Image (cartoon, rainbow, N blue to C red):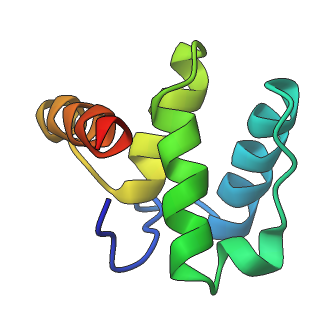
Amino acid sequence: MNTAHLKAPEGCDRFLDLVDFKWLMAGMGWWVNLSRLQSDQAYIDECLRRAMTSDSELLRKRGVELLGLSDAQSDTAVSSTFIGLAS
């Protein structure tokens, strides 16, 4: 994934969205470092890749929200993630 930065939906507190994402990831067994999630592009990409390929619909939804994608774009993002994992 080539993401420039994480975006929070309008009217939401970005930090709370990141904490929510962190705990959803923890529920899947993936620990998330919030400092790195806000500053390290490779780490952001890896976390979002994991989220988008998880079995958790809610985690995938939160990943899409952090990316700032619409529902139609999220299908493309998930497809791109699977292609990237296959190569």
Residue at the image point whose x is 80% and y is 69% from the top: 34
Name above or below for residue 18 compared with residue 59.
below
- The reply to whether residue 9 is in sight is no
Q: Residue furthest bottom?
A: 39
Q: In which quarter of the image is residue 76?
A: top left
Q: In which quarter of the image is residue 67?
A: bottom left
Residue at the image point whose x is 62% and y is 69% from the top: 43
70 lies left or right of 78: left
Instruction: Give the percent coordinates (x, y) of residue 40.
Output: 61, 83
Instruction: Give the percent coordinates (x, y) of residue 81.
Output: 32, 41
Nearer the observer, 74 or 29: 29
63 lies left or right of 30: left
67 lies left or right of 83: right
Which quadrant of the figure contains the N terminus? bottom left
Which quadrant of the figure contains the C terminus? top left
Name above or below for residue 80 compared with residue 40.
above
Nearer the observer, 47 or 16: 47
Residue at the image point whose x is 64% and y is 65% from the top: 13
Instruction: Give the percent coordinates (x, y) of residue 82.
Output: 31, 32
- The reply to whether residue 2 is in sight is yes
